[in-house]
Amino acid sequence: MLTRNCLLLFLWLFCEQGSPSPIHSPPQPQSRLGKERPRHLVGQLGGHHGGATFQRVKRGWVWNQFFVLEEYMGSEPQYVGKLHTDMDKGTSAVKYTLSGEGAGSIFTIDQTTGDIHALRSLDREEQPYYTLRAQAVDMDTGRALEPESEFVIKVQDINDNEPKFLEGPYTGNVPEMSPVGTYVMRVTATDADDPTYGNSARVVYSILHGQPYFSVDPKTGEIRTALPNMDREVREVYHVLIQAKDMGGQLGGLAGTTTVNITLSDVNDNPPRFSKSIFHLKVAESSAVGSAVGRIKAHDLDTGKNAEVEYNIVPGDGGALFDITTNEHNQEGIILLRRPLDYETKKAYTFKVEASNAHVDPRFQNLGPFKDMATVKVSVLDVDEPPVFSESSYVMDVDEDTPVGLIIGSVTAQDLDAGSSPIRYSIDWKSDLDSYFDIDPVEGTISTNELLDRESIAQHNISIVATKVNNPVLTSRVAVTVHVNDVNEFPPEFAMPYETFVCENAKEGQVIQLVSAKDRDLPPAGQKFTYKAAQDENEIRNFTVRDFGNNTAGIVTMHGGFRRRAQEFYEVPVVISDSGYRAMSSTGTLAVRVCVCDSDGSLLTCNAEALFLPVGLSTGALIAILLCIIILLVMVVLYVGVRRQKEKETLMTSKEDVRDNVIHYDDEGGGEEDTHAFDMGTLRNPVKAVDNNNGNQLRRDIRPEPSLVPIIRPPVTPLSSHDTDDIRGFLQQRLQQHDADVSAPPYDSLATYAYEGEGSVAESLSSIQSLTRDGGAGGGGGEADEDYDYLSEWGPRFRTLAGIFSERSESQHDLTSAATSTATSSSATGAATKENKQH
């Protein structure tokens, strides 16, 4: 503090001595912060004679560049300098004014003396200089005595800012085991003071903490290693304190510090090492192949890829049963089982494992081999295991005609454990649902339990279960395949049905058909068939069989000149034999049809089917075509019949009307005046109506049908007067009944009456009347009781009629009660009309 005050006092005294002087004083040297302003020509206006004259005068302002000390802490305003002009004669007639940056607020001027003072402390780092303008004016008139001039007040720097590390704290790294002088990083400090003035901004670097491991360059700030062979495994991180001091590091300079964290990066300078030389592991003999037996680890002090370890089993005793892999996460060696273990065979294994680095740095190979070796001893633990079959699978053969209970084979299993438990055998029921086989539970012999048929099941796959008596939970299974051998039990037969024909013009020795055979017995690929003709003298004279030796044969003609009219079909018996043990044979009959062929032997005609055979149509296709044709014909006939039926106007309103020759006219007449609809005279005089019919007079109520042949009517016998009176009486009775009917309508109506007459010598021809008469007598006779069985004895032509009457006789009894009140008119029909006004 004392040093700083002394320095401020010295600067103040220096400024006092450098205040402005009259123009006649010698010129001052130019400052570093500015240049001396040039002199100007000033023109004076007016003179003693009142004329305008111009003359060269010297500039009246005299001053040097002004300086003000920053951070001034005095109680009085800091004196900056003094302004003076030659026109100032000391009579206080000149007034000085100040304008520009900080005028009035920071800087002030005495209007009479021209002294300039700084009102407050200034900081160069905020603003290094201020530009102002000064002018001298007449005190009384305010007229400018000199042109306005510009000058600069510079803030003179002092060492008031310490160096700063703007990017700190710093982090760096350097490989371990690096030689001395290895570059680590560079640090930089910044000083806000003026670097062009003194040593305030001159920075020097040094290490306060971190020696003797690192050093720093005083000028550049570069940090380098200062100690060789620094080992990361001993110490990894170093905290270095760096100082930056201004004033060139001299006493009184300001200083700033920063921390540099330096980390030693790893290199592969350490080999892997096992924690112990022998590892003891245990594994159960039932462990599956590929399962983990145990883990071992070699420790490497390095990190990252430099600590990656590879494990290998050294070839030797027991090493072939195991394998080892590396766990990438923790670098452990995992020992795996390559082959099954058996405690009863070998109880312990010993082998060596080598651990080495995957990435070796050649700079450190002189330190020794980067690998280590350890011994691994694996003890096999005994486990109670299930029985073991002597074979992995069994195959047995049996003939299909083997009797029940015959032994076809056996299986064997044993307990390999030290206890050697007895074994019991059984058949898995899921594999033999039909119980074709049985097994001896102690001996393991397999026998048939059912008769076997190769044609039904050619191969049986069963599963045999072996169970330990001492521990029934432990079981094992084995697959047994039983092949059912074929026994020659089926005779051969034709491979397909043959349709054979022989041409009438066939020659002697001509092959008319090739035949082959099939056999349901095995093997189908290696069967051998022989063919020969049966001992039939009739057929041998016409055809014979020729065996070609390749399981086929041909039907050969013995002569020519076959005639279809003489004999259309021939039957050729063929004896087919197989080549199996106890050969079997069968006789197949081949039907040969005589057909007409052309000269080339192509079929021309045999029958309807034969004509279509060359075209490729089968019997089923021909039948389908014929059925389609018949259906079309029936549809055409039905269509024509329906059309004709629609064209006819049927007078019968109901087909179930049981009355004969009763015609209903469903239209209302117009009374007696309507002579077109009904001829009343015809009803009143039937004899005349008959005569008119004999005269071929057409009826009005029936549309005549066209006919090319003249209608010849038989002569009609006139009715007697007795018959006419009978009809007239019947009509009168019906009219009276109708007139007495209170429900009759009040208008003209048509009443139709049916009268059958009183009978005749031949009695009624109506079947209904006969049924009514017989049924009403209660005799139970008539048609219902009549026996029509004699119609069946008349021959096939009356068979249909006998069936109809037999059905009617069964259902006629139900219709008897309904038919007693119904009568059919067979002799006459009458109709009468009446008017209510006449009666």
Image (cartoon, rainbow, N blue to C red):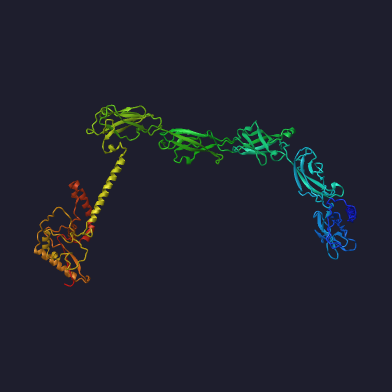
Residue 666 percent coordinates (x, y): 22, 63
Residue 405 percent coordinates (x, y): 44, 35
Along the viewing direction, whichever of 529 and 607 lies nearer the viewer: 607
User: Is residue 306 depicted above or below 637 in this figure?
Assistant: above
User: Is residue 815 depicted above or below 255 in this figure?
Assistant: below
Along the viewing direction, whichever of 272 and 694 lies nearer the viewer: 694
The picture quadrant where one finds residue 322 is top right
Judged left or right of residue 244, residue 649 is left
Q: Residue at x 66, y 40 (%)?
A: 328
Residue 79 percent coordinates (x, y): 87, 58
**Image quadrant where one finds the C terminus:** bottom left
Q: Is residue 755 visible?
A: yes
**Image quadrant where one finds the N terminus:** bottom right
User: Is residue 136 depicted above or below 176 in this figure?
Assistant: below
Tell me how many marks there are.
0
Along the viewing direction, whichever of 463 and 32 lies nearer the viewer: 32
The picture quadrant where one finds residue 388 is top right
Residue 42 percent coordinates (x, y): 83, 57
